[in-house]
Amino acid sequence: MKKIIVQQQDFDLSTEVRHARAGNNIGAVVSFIGTVRDLDDGAILKMWLEHYPKMSEKALSAIADKALDRWKIGNVTIIHRVGDLAPNAQIVLVITTSKHRKSAFAACEFIIDYLKTQAPFWKKEYGEHNSKWVKAKDETPTSRWD
């Protein structure tokens, strides 16, 4: 099963894990939650996440398909939020399930690496006196998965 959602409202980890585990003979559930960071020590009031609905959902689905093809995993859940988000708010959830932990961990890490670099989302940070678009960057290139 593959669950891909882009939404404004928050998500609940316990609920999503319960859904990911349903109807699946699994031995491992791995999850990742990305949150809004305030790297400017309180200077960020909010972050705005923008996307093109059809494009972002298609990109997330393609990333999930790559993980499903590469590892023996059961379910994949990707929930990505858009709109106004406060510091420490949840932005993204990735859940993978499998019979064995190594596949679940690898697939989850793969998905988040690709999501950070390949998914079409744009972030704008708002401070008290200014705003700026955040450049897409990630410390882990996806080339390590080739």
Image (cartoon, helix red, strand yellow):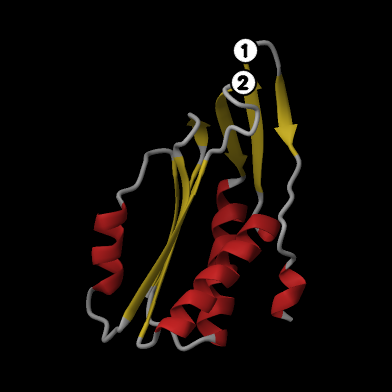
Kind of residue sitting beneath label 2: Ala
Residue appearing at x 59%, y 53% in the figure: 56
Q: Are marks 1 and 2 in contact (CB under 8 Å)?
A: yes
Identify which residue is drawn at 73% across, 32% down.
133
Name the residue rendered at 64%, 34% in the picture. Answer: 39
Describe the element under mark 1 as helix, strand or loop.
loop
Q: Is residue 133 above or below residue 96?
A: above
Q: Is residue 60 above or below residue 132?
A: below
Question: Which of 105 and 82 lies nearest the eye of the viewer?
Answer: 105
Q: Earlier along the polypeptide chain: callout 1 or callout 2?
A: 2
- Between 81 and 107, which is closer to the camera in this rendering? 107
Residue corresponding to mark 2? 43
Name the residue tied to disc 1.
128
**Where on the picture, by quarter, is residue 5?**
bottom left
Q: Which of 52 and 123 is in front in this view?
A: 123
Q: Crowding at label 1, few (<14), some or many (≥20) Cα neighbours within 10 Å?
A: few
Q: Residue at x 73, y 76 (%)?
A: 144
Q: What's the residue type where badge 1 is placed?
A: Glu
The location of residue 40, given as percent across then percent down, is 65, 28
Q: In which quarter of the image is residue 27?
A: bottom left
**Residue 62 % position (x, y):** 59, 70
